[in-house]
Structure formats: C-alpha cells, structure tokens
Image: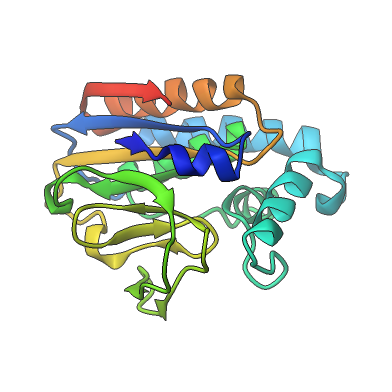
Amino acid sequence: MKLDSLVREKYPEFIAGYVRVSGVTIEPSVEGLVERKREIFSDLKARYGAVPALDISEVKAYRAFFKAMGADPSSYRPAPEFLLRRALDDRFPAVNNVVDSCLLATVENWVVVGVYDVDRVKGQAVTTLAAEAEPFELIDGRKVSPKLDEIILRDDEKLLSAYTLGDAKATLIKPETSNVLMVLWNAPSVSRERVENALAAVSTYARKYCGGHIDEKAVL
C-alpha cells in the first residue's frame, strides 16, 4: 500500500500502516480469539467503564477528525468509539476470525484497522484524498460518496473505503477469501506508537487465529 503525500500535506499528523497476509482460513469463531476478546474487554471495562465516552481523549480526537472532513460523528460514530461502546455493553460485533481480529486490534489500540480481500484489489491500494464525489457501495448496501478531501483507500479502479463512511462491499471478506490487506489509520494525536502497537497486534492475530503468513507490513 502507498500513502499519497497529499494526505500528509492536508493532515500532517495522519499516520497509516498496512499488513499483507496470505493463506488465511476464514472461520466463524476461534476459541483462542474469543478468550483474547474477554481479556481485552475486561481491561476496557476497568479503564473506561465509569468514564463518559465523550470525556475520553481518543474519542475527542476521532470526533474532531470526522468534523474536519465534514462528517457528523454523532450520526455516524468513528469505529474506535463505536467498538468501545459495544465492548462496554457486551455487544461487540462477531463476524469471522479475520474481521474480528481487526476489530479487536482497533478497540484495544485506538487505531482504525480495516481488512480487504487482496484478490479483488486491482493494482495497488493507495491511501489518498477524495478529489470528487465518487459513489461506492458500503458493506451494508448503502450507496455513498466521500466528501472532497476526505481520506480514502482506493485501487486502480474503485474505492475500497472512506474514512468517515466505512468499507466497500467490493472487497468484503468472504468464506473463500485467502489473502487479505489490513490497513491501519489513526486520528491526529493518536501516536505513531499506537499505530505500531496495532500493527503488531493484528499481525499476531492474523498468524495465531487465522492461520495466515505475514508477507509484508509497514507503518508509513
């Protein structure tokens, strides 16, 4: 994956990372990952259970970044905040081992981790800025378009994700998926160390709980 220099020019504190993983096996649930979730959720409850979400500095950071890109974080919550609220309410999403690994790395490190089927990515994936209102279909079927200068992920043909909107259906992880690209994005004031920790966590989960092989990874 590449990071377009235009992104850093517009948002100087933005950091991206990625992991390319081959040979994953998609499973509805993996016992070790379920136990790891319990450990993380217990820690989150101890740390944030009595704290109003809007008082958490990382929640403030993501909400401010959404607003900077023209989005209302009250109507569509940033992923780390959404996942924290779900973890505290015992309603954390469960999709499959690969997606769940990324969701868990997101909530434990305050870094957005998205995952895409590499075999349906055309050319090279690039984190860049939206230059036009290019429509795409989200995983839930909604048709949306990013705003001008919103951070997006795209390949040579299409949008894969938009920062405030979510991931495209075109590269959805399916039961037959075997090769994936995991992409990490921060918000300003969420440190490079956090991104590095999230990269390490999701790489471990990909090997340990998904049977994958790490082909390439980097913080950009």
Residue 125 makes an appearance in the image: yes
* 88 shown above or below 107: below
* 91 shown above or below 25: below
Residue 29 makes an appearance in the image: no
Which quarter shows the C terminus? top left
- Which residue is at 55% across, 39% downward? 9
Q: Position of residue 25 (x, y in %)?
A: 17, 39
Q: Position of residue 194 (x, y in %)?
A: 59, 25
- Which residue is at 47% across, 43% downward? 6
- Which residue is at 72% across, 55% downward? 63
Q: Colour mode? A: rainbow
Task: Count all numbered tags in the image, as a single digit.
Answer: 0
Q: Position of residue 109 (x, y in %)?
A: 59, 31
Foreground pick, 28 / 15: 15
Which quarter shows the N terminus? top left
Q: Position of residue 100 (x, y in %)?
A: 41, 45
> Toward which corner of the image does residue 189 lie, by quadrant?
top right
* 2 shown above or below 120: above
Instruction: Give the left or right position of residue 153, taking residue 210 as reference.
Output: right
- Which residue is at 87% across, 47% downward? 55
Foreground pick, 85 / 128: 128
> Toward which corner of the image does residue 161 lie, by quadrant?
bottom left
